[in-house]
Amino acid sequence: MFKIALLPGDGVGPEVIREAVKCLDVVGKRFSLELRFQAALVGGAAVEATGRPLPPDTLELCRQSDAVLFGAVGGQKYDGLPRELRPERAILDLRQELGLYANLRPARLFLPLIAASTLKEEVVRGIDLLVVRELTGGIYFGKPRGIEPIEGGERAVDTLIYTTAEIERIAKVAFQAAQRRRRKVTSVDKANVLASSELWRRVVNGVARAFPEVALEHMYVDNCAMQLVRDPRQFDVILTENMFGDILSDEAAMLVGSIGMLPSASIGAKVGIYEPIHGSAPDLAGKDKANPIAAILSGAMMLRHTFGQEEAAEAMEEAVANALERGYRTPDIQSPGTTLVGTTQMGDLIASELSEG
Ligand code: IPM
Ligand code: MG
């Protein structure tokens, strides 16, 4: 039996998680997996109900589950809250509390979507890259941090820290992933300016010695941002620190048509978190317009990485590909000659592809 904590959260989170669960139920039956779901409050929804973005009950449920399927958190109506009560705090605390230092964000082009990318077809055809983002360190968590009054105004501090051990463990994840892929790691840093990047580069070089069959290159983050739109097919695994990974993974998502397509896995300890990277998109919420595919593909990543069910994971990915092949599109990936469908219908179509096998 696999215990899955469902944290739908805010905005389009609940709608896309509903479709992911629909598909997981079908895949569970087909492959005789016993998947048990239990839902809990997180983000703005939790602030409204309990006054806290990550209530203790929710954290406890996650700890006692095998995996977490996470929707999205945040929304303009929470912008005025103090930093510690903002919905985003929930996902940051969850990552840290559960020890999930490795964030995997694969970007692969589904061929039927080639026209949905804003880039030329010959640039994006065949994109298949994986961003491996460090997730519990760097400027997101470093101390001191805060804003204090000074004469004539205020002063704000954030601290960017990395230790050898933190860099080593994330580098290993990237090299191991590359072994199963096209055996190339591009380590992204800003070693021409930042001390943390100087250490990053040195430690990554050390880890690389244990993986002689994997090619390693180093790239400055500004150059990487440019290379991603110039020639994205040069990349296999991109290894990078927390904030650079946040930025570059949004960019990578758009290369393959829509941020509504990209799943993610946060792993490194017992309980993994699986979530679409698109966020809460409050303007789309409740309109049956959100693309559920990133959430459904996050479910597939959960089957693969936490439950070791490769075949079931591939079946889900194939069902997504088939629905796209048949011309069905949510608004974010629509192009001339395709059939527009809503969130629920896209989920139904993928679920029925799955049950037909
Ligand atoms: C992401 C998001 C989060 C992050 C936010 C919601 C805190 O942008 O998962 O990429 O910055 O890590
Ligand atoms: Mg982000």
Image: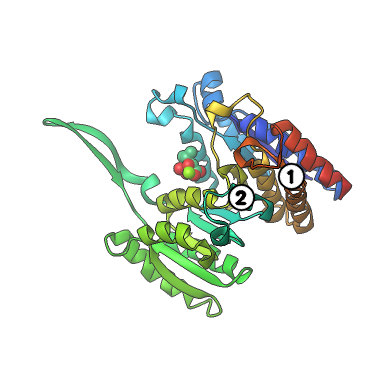
Q: Say what amino acid the circle numbered 1 marks.
A: Gly
- What quarter of the picture does the N terminus occupy? top right
The answer to whether residue 136 of the structure is visible from this angle is no
Which numbered circle lies on residue 327?
Answer: 1
Which numbered circle lies on residue 115?
Answer: 2
Q: Say what amino acid the circle numbered 2 marks.
A: Ala
**Horizontal side, residue 287 vs residue 204: left or right:** right
Which residue: 75% across, 50% down?
Answer: 325
Label 1: state its secondary structure: loop
The answer to whether residue 134 of the structure is visible from this angle is yes
Q: How many marks?
A: 2
For label 1, being within 8 Å of ligand 2 is answered no
The image quarter containing residue 157 is top left
Which numbered circle lies on residue 353?
Answer: none
Which residue: 58% across, 57% down?
Answer: 121
**Horizontal side, residue 23 vs residue 90: left or right:** right
Residue 211 locus on image (x, y percent): 53, 76
For label 2, being within 8 Å of ligand 2 is answered no
User: How far apart, in angstroms, are the residues tagged by discs 1 and 2?
Assistant: 12 Å
Residue found farthest to the top? 49
The image quarter containing residue 217 is bottom left
Residue 169 locus on image (x, y percent): 49, 62
Label 2: state its secondary structure: helix
Residue 251 locus on image (x, y percent): 48, 50
Which residue: 41% across, 31% down?
Answer: 84
- Between 145 and 283, the one lying in front of the other is 283
